[in-house]
């Protein structure tokens, strides 16, 4: 332990990251950006380590080095506990954490190795990209994202405080929950969705070429994560089998119910499908919106604009003159068309005043839409 | 019939579009951009019709008008056949088509109305957005996309030739297949995927707030189409029940198999999950690539911005001062963070000059991404 008492900022001058992939390298970039004096990386793959270094994620750990303030283990989930055990034996650092997207099974495995759990805090920065490796790393990967910390009953308070500080330095929001709750949550928001994307893509693999040719951007979005690594996902599935099975069975059951309704001869049986879509509308609205807050509802004000440089700036300047905060906007412009549509997203009570101001200033404003959920 | 013989370009000077929603309005924009002299719109909703007109999609159909070269019916699927019958009775046009995403049931219904099938060609431009209405319309919505045409046994060759020409003028690729094959294909690439996205979003609706807060961009992409309209989807499901049920049963079966393997006590049972992901990799590779469409490529320039009123106007004013036209932009507000990322979409050759100007003016600009496909 670094010995800092409560209220003292934990020492974070020397941090080692073991595993220079997407997450490890992004942590390195984030910590160096945040001003951590010494970030060192270790990876069994020398080329990866060199690339990570060139990208500015940190220097290599030198042979025989020990005593880092924090060691972050960023290796595949199935290897995490063993690597933790080995690094503690090498006395590489004072406090240890990891980044695996499953938490109970590595923790249980670590216990079975007899590691010092007081110095270990399981961690999971909930961020990622469909591309892996140090080249895909970004120092802003964790900005505003949850960084889950799962202390064990034995984890020392100082160790948890230190890891909170690491997460915050990376721009993330520390979220302390127990390992089982984390794994159930990830089964729902990440692991089962992976299975759904993959099963849909697998169905497509059996389609003839003409059929596949009719696929659009909706299906491409829906199956984007189907590009993921089978070996990594075998590890995750093995490490979180029960909670994933729970969600998959629930999903399969609902799909069977909808299919059965579609098979029924009575007219109106398709309402089962409509109810599913309606339930989906409601569920989708629960996704985190701006600033992690529950989604606010917004009004959307359509304004017709000419297709010329600076027009958007003038529109927003006029909106700003009305003292109204534009929460978001989207542009719709058809190539070749002389006008486009700018949709201003504002608080519902601000839509009418904004429309009045803009019309007074000569803009062509259309009636605001019904409030929609923020993203 | 317009009487043009084979080899003569079909007359396409006057086109009526009935239904000024996303698809109808986009067809209007596309045809007007392609130089069709007279595009007229009809919609029972006067506000929609006015917005469509302001956006340049076409003038309103006048009372008593008739004899359009082509009439395109762009109303909800369940209303298509009845509207076709009524428009033919009004003698609105010479050749009729529609845009419904199901083809067999509207066709069967049209037969039951006793319409003149020689003058009708079922159509489905396979393009869309998760948002509806004229505000979301784009003239380039159909660029490089398939436009399925399903002639009946009675459809006159001239009628089919004319609709091929309409599709081509919209930038689409005409694909002639029979209605049953179309419906089976759409069940796989569109209708069942809708059910999957919705069932996943519906599961999320039962999650507690902490769980929902852990959702990331992967889940947002995966459930994007779960925002769709339940009433529309009830109609689609009713009109394509059998083929949709086939796919849903197959998907549910595979999910059950994976769940059963996860429940099994033997180690290594999770390889079933890994195999699913591998099958998904292969299936995903069958999706049409960028060559399938002919989108413009753009560069994306990420700029870090503070979350405060007027900031976007200042950014765009500075971009405008550089004489650069921002084609599109998207905002990423990280939950809880005081800053966000604004991604400016510009022509690839303008990314570097824009970055230079913005940096000079004190903005934090990240390196532009490799050019991406336009949306």
Image (cartoon, coloured by chain):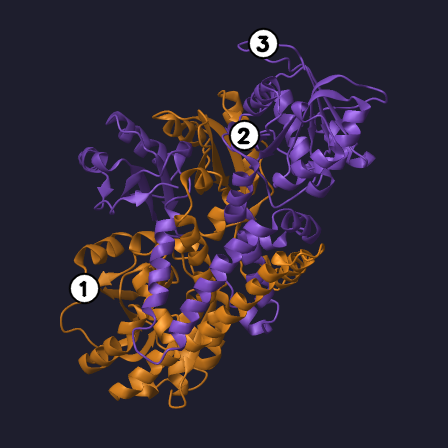
Chain colours: A purple, B orange
Q: Secondary structure at mark 1?
A: loop
Question: Which residue lies at the image location 70% right of the left edge and 29% below the top edge?
Answer: A55
Numbered label attached to residue B355: 2
Q: Secondary structure at mark 2?
A: helix
Q: Secondary structure at mark 3?
A: loop
Total marks drawn?
3
Residue occupied by mark 1: B44
Residue B107 seen:
yes
Disc nearer the start of the sequence (2/1)? 1
Of tags 2 and 3, the one toward the viewer is 3
Q: Chain of mark 3?
A: A
Residue occupied by mark 3: A5
Q: Chain of mark 2?
A: B
Please name whichever residue, A228 or A215, is drawn nearer the observer in this view of the structure.
A228
Crowding around mark 3 (Cα neighbors within 10 Å: few <14, some 14 to 19, many 20+) is few
Q: Chain of mark 1?
A: B
Residue A303 seen:
no
In whole angstroms, how far apart are the C-alphas of marks 2 and 3?
46 Å
In whole angstroms, how far apart are the C-alphas of marks 2 and 1?
47 Å
Residue B336: x and y, percent?
A: 44, 28
């Amino acid at each position: 332990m670094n010995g800092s008492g409560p209220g003292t900022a934990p020492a974070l001058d020397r941090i080692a990251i073991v595993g220079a992939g997407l997450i490890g390298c992004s942590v390195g970039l984030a910590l160096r950006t945040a001003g951590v004096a010494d970030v060192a990386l270790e990876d069994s793959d020398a080329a990866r380590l060199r690339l990570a270094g060139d990208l500015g994620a940190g220097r290599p750990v030198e042979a025989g080095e020990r005593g880092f303030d924090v060691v972050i283990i960023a290796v595949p989930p199935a290897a995490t506990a063993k690597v933790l055990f080995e690094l503690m034996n090498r006395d590489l650092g004072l406090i240890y954490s990891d980044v695996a997207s499953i938490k109970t099974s590595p923790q249980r495995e670590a216990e079975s190795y007899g590691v010092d759990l007081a110095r270990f805090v399981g961690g999971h920065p909930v961020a990622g990209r469909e591309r892996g490796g140090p080249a895909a790393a970004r120092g802003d990967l964790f900005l505003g994202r949850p960084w889950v910390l799962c202390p064990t009953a034995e984890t020392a308070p100082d160790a948890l405080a230190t890891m909170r500080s690491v997460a915050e330095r990376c721009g993330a929001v520390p979220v302390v929950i127990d390992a089982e709750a984390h794994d159930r949550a990830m089964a729902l928001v990440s692991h089962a969705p992976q299975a759904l994307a993959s099963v849909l893509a697998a169905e497509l693999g059996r389609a003839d070429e003409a059929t596949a040719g009719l696929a659009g951007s909706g299906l491409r979005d829906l199956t984007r994560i189907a590009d993921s690594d089978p070996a990594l996902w075998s590890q995750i599935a093995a490490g979180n089998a029960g909670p994933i099975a729970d969600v998959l069975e629930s999903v399969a059951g609902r799909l069977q119910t909808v299919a059965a309704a579609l098979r029924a001869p009575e007219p109106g049986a398709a309402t089962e499908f409509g109810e599913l879509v309606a339930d989906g509308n409601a569920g989708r609205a629960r996704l985190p919106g701006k600033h992690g807050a529950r989604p606010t509802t917004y009004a959307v004000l359509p304004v017709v604009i000419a297709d010329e440089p600076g027009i958007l700036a003038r529109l927003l300047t006029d909106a700003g003159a009305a003292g109204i905060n534009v929460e978001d906007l989207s542009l719709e412009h058809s190539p070749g068309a002389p006008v486009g549509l700018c949709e201003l997203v504002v608080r519902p009570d601000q839509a009418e005043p904004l429309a009045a101001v803009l019309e007074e200033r000569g803009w062509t404003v259309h009636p605001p839409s019904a409030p929609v959920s923020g993203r």
